[in-house]
Image: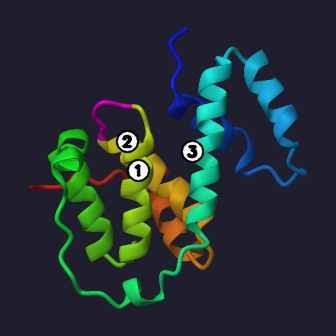
Amino acid sequence: MKENVFDVLMYLFENYIYDDEPQPDRESLESELFDAGFHQVEIRKAFDWLDALTQSRDLPHGLMEESRAIRLFTDDEQAKLDTESRGFILFLEQAGVLGPASREVIIERLMALEEEETDLDLVKWVSLMVLYNQPGQEEAYAWMENLLFENPVHLVH
């Protein structure tokens, strides 16, 4: 079984995000993931990824939200995020779903994954996870969730 960090994240997101039950502790989750067939290394990397996502909520975003600057992607970001993925991120920002701070968290979390390249589905899922984690982003999360599950968008470049 070739599992990666994103597979672990998806398992957690799909099994616990909509669950109104009390969330199990980290040790119980690690045990459940191991029993589900995930490797310990990938489980720990997934929890590190989630810890970094949680820490992004504590960053000061106020001034950045007022910014009208144009985002240029670094060479590393361009190598990892294909044109369709970068276009989708910019589309979300232009549509008002993402602010500059959320956009940066999404890009940072995509770059933190061990995938050599990302595809549009990965960008959509990471965007959904980031919006779910950001306070005050409930409307953007609902919009993104609707886009992901009910109405796929095909972007023209």
Read off the residue under disc 2: 121
User: For the residues carrying marks 3 and 2, which lies nearer the camera in this image?
Assistant: 3
Q: Which mark is residue 49?
A: 3
Is 103 in front, or is 75? Answer: 75
Read off the residue under disc 1: 124
Q: Amino acid at mark 1?
A: Lys
Tell me which numbered mark, 3 or 2, is placed earlier along the sequence: 3
Instruction: Evaluate if marks 3 and 2 touch, with contact meaning CB atoms under 8 Å apart.
Output: no
Q: Is residue 97 visible?
A: no
Residue at 82% from the left image edge and 25% from the top image edge: 31
In space, the residues marked 3 and 1 are separated at their CA atoms by 17 Å
Disc 1, SS: helix
- Quarter of the picture containing the C terminus is bottom left
Residue 110 placed where, x, y %?
39, 47
Instruction: Evaluate if marks 3 and 1 touch, with contact meaning CB atoms under 8 Å apart.
Output: no
Instruction: Evaluate if marks 1 and 2 touch, with contact meaning CB atoms under 8 Å apart.
Output: yes
Vertical order, 3 against 89 (above or below): above
Residue at 48% from the left image edge and 81% from the top image edge: 61
